[in-house]
Image (cartoon, helix red, strand yellow):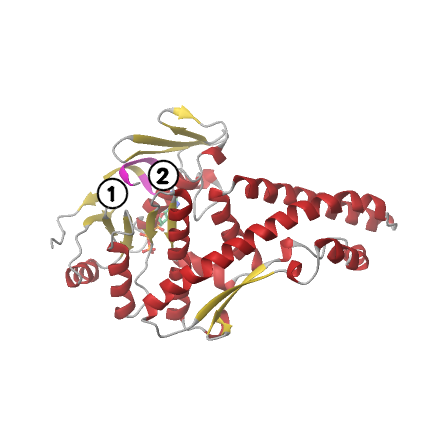
Amino acid sequence: MYLSKLSLINFKNYQQADVSLSPDINCFIGPNGAGKTNILDAIYYLSMCKSYLNPIDSQNILFDENFFVIQSTWNNDDTVYCGVKKGQKKVFKKNKVTYEKLADHIGLFPSVMISPYDRNLILEGSEVRRKWMDGIISQFDRQFLHDLIKYGKVLSQRNALLKNMGSYGFFDQESISVWNEQLIEYGNNIHAARKKIVDDFIPIFQKYYQWLSNNNEEVSLTYRSQLFDSSFEDLLAGATRNDQRKQYTTVGTHKDDFIFTIKGHPIKKFGSQGQQKSYLIALKLAQYEWLLTQLNRKPVLLLDDIFDKLDNGRVERLMQMVSDQDFGQVLITDTDKERIDTIFKNNQIEYKAFEIEENTVVESTLKTTV
Ligand SMILES: Nc1ncnc2c1ncn2[C@@H]1O[C@H](COP(=O)(O)OP(=O)(O)OP(=O)(O)O)[C@@H](O)[C@H]1O
């Protein structure tokens, strides 16, 4: 699965851009703010029907315009179209046929982005990590996505009821129990799916981290959930008073977390910047391998600003890995032409280069040949 052609109209800083890509490695080079990440984000849109960076579609329209269009050709054959117009519903088409539900598109043109914004996975609260893990599962497990949406709806109804009862100063266990049943059903399914993926995911993730760090450091990932300690029924029963007092649901899978550690300690506190970055890259490469296995198609790998904070050994091992045949199409951004050229020449890797200047993408003459 690879993207052969990409055309942008009024997407972020691009009034118009047309790019013909190599099925292997593509590098986008330009100064800060040139629009390198925006190219990767356009591809992420085609894959996931949304921006990786800005969830508000209309804010991805070029300033002072009222629509954007992203068009693409995949494997020189399939076309995918994304159109956003202010005040209108987003339109997605595959081979000129409009999707009724965007969810039907997810998983057909998979991609994995590795970006400096992934730091949030380590630094922020548990919600970011749950969303990331749930996003992976949802790409191949429609039932999980359904259960997740239902769980969210039931949870907000239950919370609204608790708040309502709190403000009127009464508590009716029977009304609450109506929601408990559904919460338990969907919650147990979510827990089982998260547990399954983590069990399978850990060895893949560790394999990539070992490779990157040259077997130097031991890392782990643990799924933490209240459902490991008690059944959901017992948790809810035990939390009745607390829920009543706090006026929201204090137990359940919406409290789950994924704990990231290095040498047995939280990576957030005890990992260096390079180790944290390596950890995130290994997580995302594991995500890549996982999706490839589940979807049976190679995702496009989007590497944004990947070289920053990594030592030369890790950079070289990473580039050797992604240029290997296990990976398909790769897009890389960097500010430094010389660095790109040196890394690829040293590793005898061929690539196609693009330079970005003044909101224009130009195919570069820079190209290494093995
Ligand atoms: N809706 C928009 N309309 C016009 N320009 C936009 C819009 N959204 C973002 N931009 C511009 O896009 C540019 C940022 O692009 P991008 O993040 O792709 O840069 P980059 O080349 O990756 O930079 P860096 O090397 O600093 O990471 C900024 O100049 C920003 O003003």
Position of the C terminus by quadrant: bottom left
Of label 1 and label 2, which has the lower sequence position?
2
User: At 43% from the left edge and 62% from the top edge, which residue is drawn?
Assistant: 203
Does residue 15 appear left or right of residue 85 in this picture? left
Residue range corresponding to the magenta coloring: 2-14
Does residue 366 appear left or right of residue 93 in this picture? left
Q: Give the spatial CA distance, label 1 vs label 2.
A: 12 Å
Front in this rendered view, residue 195 or 170:
195
Does residue 351 appear left or right of residue 158 in this picture? left
Q: Is label 1 within 8 A of ligand 1 (CB to nearest ligand atom)?
A: no
User: At 44% from the left edge and 35% from the top edge, which residue is drawn?
Assistant: 105
Q: Secondary structure at mark 2?
A: strand
Q: Position of residue 258 (x, y in %)?
A: 54, 61
Residue 260, compared with residue 115, is above or below; it is: below
Identify the residue at the far top of this view. Answer: 97
Q: Is residue 353 visible?
A: yes
Residue 143, compared with residue 304, is above or below; it is: above
Residue 209, compared with residue 48, is above or below; it is: below
Q: Position of residue 59 (x, y in %)?
A: 45, 41
User: At 28% from the left edge and 49% from the top edge, which residue is drawn?
Assistant: 330
Front in this rendered view, residue 204 or 178:
204
Q: Which residue is mark 1?
A: 360
Q: Is residue 309 visible?
A: no
User: At 28% from the left edge and 56% from the top edge, which residue is drawn?
Assistant: 322
Q: Secondary structure at mark 1?
A: strand
User: Was residue 9 drawn as part of the magenta stretch in this picture?
Assistant: yes
Q: Which residue is mark 2?
A: 11
User: Was residue 169 drawn as part of the magenta stretch in this picture?
Assistant: no
Numbered mark located on residue 191 in the image: none
Does residue 231 appear left or right of residue 196 in this picture? right
Q: Amino acid at mark 2?
A: Phe
